[in-house]
Image (cartoon, grey):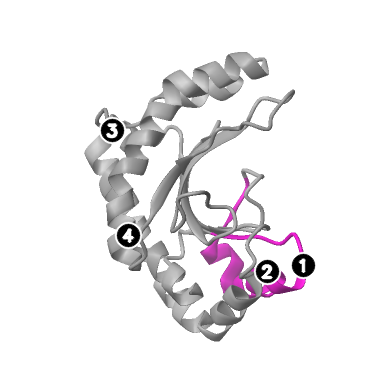
Amino acid sequence: MTAFSGFRQEDFDVFAVDGLDQRMDAIKTVIRPKLEALGHHFAPILSAATGDEMFYHVAKHARRTVNPPADTWVAWANDKRGYKKHPHFQIGLWQTHLFVWYAVIYEAPAKDKISQSFSEHLDEIMTLVPDYFHWSPDHTAPDSTSQAELGKAGVKKLVDRLAQVKKAELLCGLTIDRHDPVLADPQALLGQLENTFAVLSKLYTIGR
């Protein structure tokens, strides 16, 4: 396992490569080794923080036949076989930014339970999660909204929607612009990611 070396502009430029095969080749050679390194690094940290053994899964984009991926990621869940049906954690890249998420996506059967638990602990969540963290209702879109902008009413709406809408999703975490110098400093970035996961692992515990 190679040591994590941080992210450079060429990592984000991969998403400008035309063609499915060409972009997949670039993802595999340029980005995937870094995601593997992050997966290996954070699995024991997330296991300790959550009390669940966490396994990492690097996105393979195996079902794609035409459109090249617009983002890629590594995810951690307490299941060796997959992560999509479980609350999980992600680090990944869009062309514009890096993201770090606690994620409950549409395949998760426990969405109702998580929605109810988050609703009951909303005041605690609003205090626990820093205002500069972002929330998103859709893991397939690059856009997200800061907690400061959403306010308690906006977060509650996302939490309630998770139980009310079949395809609803809920993500909370941090986005870092591709030009932020922290991305090129491996130790500083790992520290920031670890601090982010310290918050997100508490969300995971509340949702459980």
Q: Position of residue 161 (x, y in %)?
A: 71, 70
| Secondary element type, mark 1 | loop
| Secondary element type, mark 2 | helix
Q: Position of residue 33 (x, y in %)?
A: 38, 27
| Secondary element type, mark 4 | helix
Q: Residue 15 lies in what quarter of the image?
A: top right
The nearer-to-camera label among 4 and 2 is 4
Residue at the outermost bottom position: 120
Q: Would you place residue 94 above or below residue 49 in this image?
A: above
Q: Along the polypeptide, which appears first: circle 1 or circle 3?
A: 3
Q: Which mark is residue 165?
A: 1
The magenta stretch spans residue 156: yes
Q: Position of residue 178 (x, y in %)?
A: 46, 33
Q: Position of residue 48 (x, y in %)?
A: 28, 63
Amino acid identity at mark 3: Phe
Disc 1 to disc 3: CB gap under 8 Å: no
Rounded to the nearest whole Å, what is the CA distance between mark 1 and mark 3?
A: 39 Å
Q: Which residue is mark 3?
A: 4
Amino acid identity at mark 2: Leu
Residue 182 visible to an observer of this rendering: yes
Q: Which mark is residue 47?
A: 4
The nearer-to-camera label among 4 and 3 is 4
